[in-house]
Amino acid sequence: MTNSLKIRVLESNAERIVLDVEGATPAFLNSIRRAAIAEVPTLAVDEVIFYNNDSVMWDEVLAHRLALIPLKVEPLEGYDALRDCYEHGNDCAALFVLDEEAVERVKTVYSGHLRFEGFEGLVEGPARINVEPVSKKIPIVKLARGQRLRLTAIAKMGVGREHAKWQPTSAVAYRFAAQIKILKEPDSETAAKIAEVCPRKVFAVEKGKLVVKNLEACNTCRECQDRYPEYVSVTWDSSKARFTLESVGALPAWKILLTAVDVLEEKASRFVDAVEAAIRGEEGGEPQN
Ligand code: SF4
């Protein structure tokens, strides 16, 4: 990373954060990307106790479906308390019950039928922490008339590197800023063809001349260069990147990003402690992942 780091926020909301980052190395951005995917703890169903399952679906399959329902914690201070609890090695389990029966006709059981009952193991935190599925409309199973599903689901904190159900992100990616050179001025007919070949409408033809009109839209697919190598060259600048992070809804996108950086900082600090201990001739700190 260079000394001057410039960041421009292009979009920031609960679902998505998009940044233009200048001055960070690809390795640094990739560390943040990987930490966001695999190291930011979230809640997911980890154990299910079935009391009745008359549905056509096996317990294991239902348990797997329940585990993949993203859960959100409100308020956000509640999430911080859970993370703290998790990082101290506790289970901090959130308990849900589900009891649905198809009395008269076929009934679809949805994520919204999960009822949050409270926590086990969370000693401190905001007085009222609520946990609920990100969407109430995720289908779990269909029950035929007379069938009943009754269970307790136990959600625990975990990280994506243990299981994908704990991943807070649906997409995290960065791409470098494109650099386009017009090597030779094409005639107006060829200019129109080059502009046409670009799926992102990066080029325009103005007064018969090919111009780069919308460089930011270029995804460096190089279709223009492959088709017209004598006219166009496409490269990229790896010190300028567009960083995009999308959340599954369990946490706001900005919170995932900041927590990922926090996790990296903690790892770096543990590494420093271990190195210092090793220099002093003591046994090293915790092993680094
Ligand atoms: S590299 Fe792809 S997106 Fe970029 S200008 Fe060429 S065709 Fe368009």
Image (cartoon, helix red, strand yellow):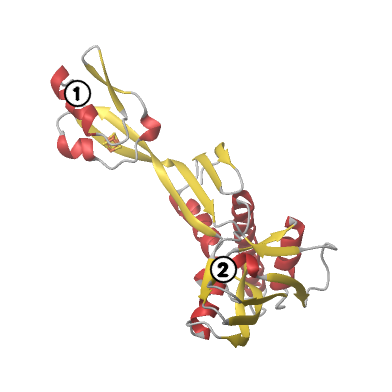
Q: Amino acid at mark 2?
A: Trp
Q: Residues within 10 Å of mark 2 (few under 14, many from 20)?
A: many
Q: Amino acid at mark 1?
A: Ala
**Residue, x 49% and y 80% (percent of image)?**
61
Q: In this view of the protein, can residue 157 be seen by the observer?
A: yes
Residue ID for mark 1: 192
**Residue, x 55% and y 85% (percent of image)?**
54
Foreground residue among 108 and 160: 108
Residue 216: image x %, image y %?
40, 33
Q: In this view of the protein, can residue 22 be seen by the observer?
A: no
Report whether the residue tagged 2 is closer than 8 Å to ligand 1: no
Using residue 187 as the reference point, say whether residue 66 is left or right of it: right
The residue most toward the front is: 104
The residue most toward the top is: 207
Rendering quarter of residue 289: bottom right
Residue 128: image x %, image y %?
82, 62
- Kindly check if marks 2 and 1 are in contact, taking CB atoms under 8 A apart as contact: no
Residue ID for mark 2: 166
Using residue 288 as the reference point, say whether residue 188 is left or right of it: left
**Residue, x 58% and y 64% (percent of image)?**
70
